[in-house]
Image (spheres, rainbow, N blue to C red):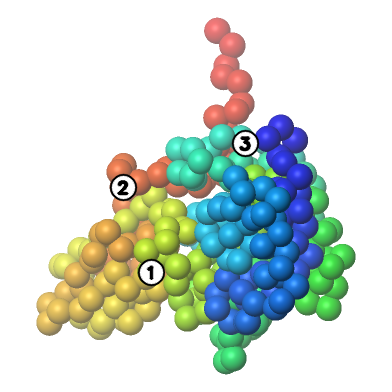
Amino acid sequence: MPGYSLFDFLHGYVYARWTFLYIGLGTGGRQLPGWLRSTVGALARLAPQTVPEAEAVLGHARGYHGKVVPLDQARQLVRVEQDVHLPDLEHVIPYPIARDIVLHNPDHIVVLQCPCRTARPAPCLPLDVCLIVGEPFASLVLRHHSTRARPISSAEAEQILEAEHARGHVHHAFFKDAMLGRFYAICNCCPCCCGAMQSTRNGTPMLASSGYVCVVDEAECLACGACAECCPFDALTWTSAAPVIDSGACMGCGVCVSVCEGEALSLERDPTRPAPLILEQLLAQLQPGPQA
């Protein structure tokens, strides 16, 4: 594909072939082996201009980004029944690279054990929560990780999404430059294990907001404090009267909304943030309008 270099191809192969090692290194869960350290050093010597990309092999976030998606939007990504070609979504994915949704055989879905969780000494369970969507990614992951991955139906993918949402975990649509510069997976992430969430909290913005922000109706608040306890981005703090929302930290995931028994919380569109990833709306924009 245009602009996809030999380095990108090698990077993508390493990422897909040794996913658990790659992510384990990025999350700090594993030591860097000598062979990989030598490989990265050789790449840097042979092509100094690609040093930033070579560093990505070690888990840096230059070309690896996620978009927070509430549950309903995550469901749309696994319900697709047709091939999709949505390039250059810079208004949705605000990064210079890896911002396309191109789905071939979107009904080919593989569930993979979460590399971030498996890198932890005491991971959250279950492990099999990462959804690889479409080709060639689903087949590639299944071929190289047959003991840690299995094909599933769209209905099974939805069940995983719903179960992870009930656990208070966040859905992220992931894009990567070396994975043909496009969407390839939905990860269901917990703040204690997820490398992308930890990187974002530590100042490396690997995640884009859903496009929404949480708001509170204090008149409906039951003062239970459940929302502050469950917020995966630490955007909610509790006072004696009502929750206080740090709108700058809020990523609009909707986890707090689902636990609020008083229905005092809701998500509102924030026009200062990238547009939501609503696949049905994006596809509708491609349809020709009625003829005059």
Position of residue 28 relative to residue 46, above or below, is: below
Is 158 in front, or is 29?
Answer: 29
Q: How crowded is mark 2: few (under 14 residues within 10 Å), some or many (20 or more)?
A: some
Residue 124's mark? none
Give percent across and percent down for residue 88.
Answer: 56, 35
Give percent across and percent down for residue 62.
Answer: 53, 54
Earlier in the chain: of badge 3 and badge 1, it is: 3
Q: How crowded is mark 1: few (under 14 residues within 10 Å), some or many (20 or more)?
A: few
At label 3, the amino acid type is Leu
At label 1, the amino acid type is Asn
Pointers 2 and 3 in contact (CB under 8 A)?
Answer: no
Earlier in the chain: of badge 2 and badge 3, it is: 3
Is 120 in front, or is 109?
Answer: 120
**Which residue is depicted at the point 47% across and 81% down?**
192
Q: Is residue 184 visible?
A: no
Is 191 in front, or is 28?
Answer: 28
- Name the residue furthest left: 240
For the image shown, how many numbered marks are present on the structure?
Answer: 3
Element on which disc 3 rests: strand
Identify the residue position indicated by label 3 in the image.
86
* Mark 1 or mark 2, whichever is nearer to me: 1
Earlier in the chain: of badge 1 and badge 2, it is: 1
Q: Horizontal placement of 71 versus 15: left or right?
A: left
Q: In which quarter of the image is residue 236?
A: bottom left
**Which residue is depicted at the point 67% across and 62% down?**
41
Residue 202's mark? 1
Disc 3 to disc 1, C-alpha distance: 31 Å
Q: Is residue 252 visible?
A: yes
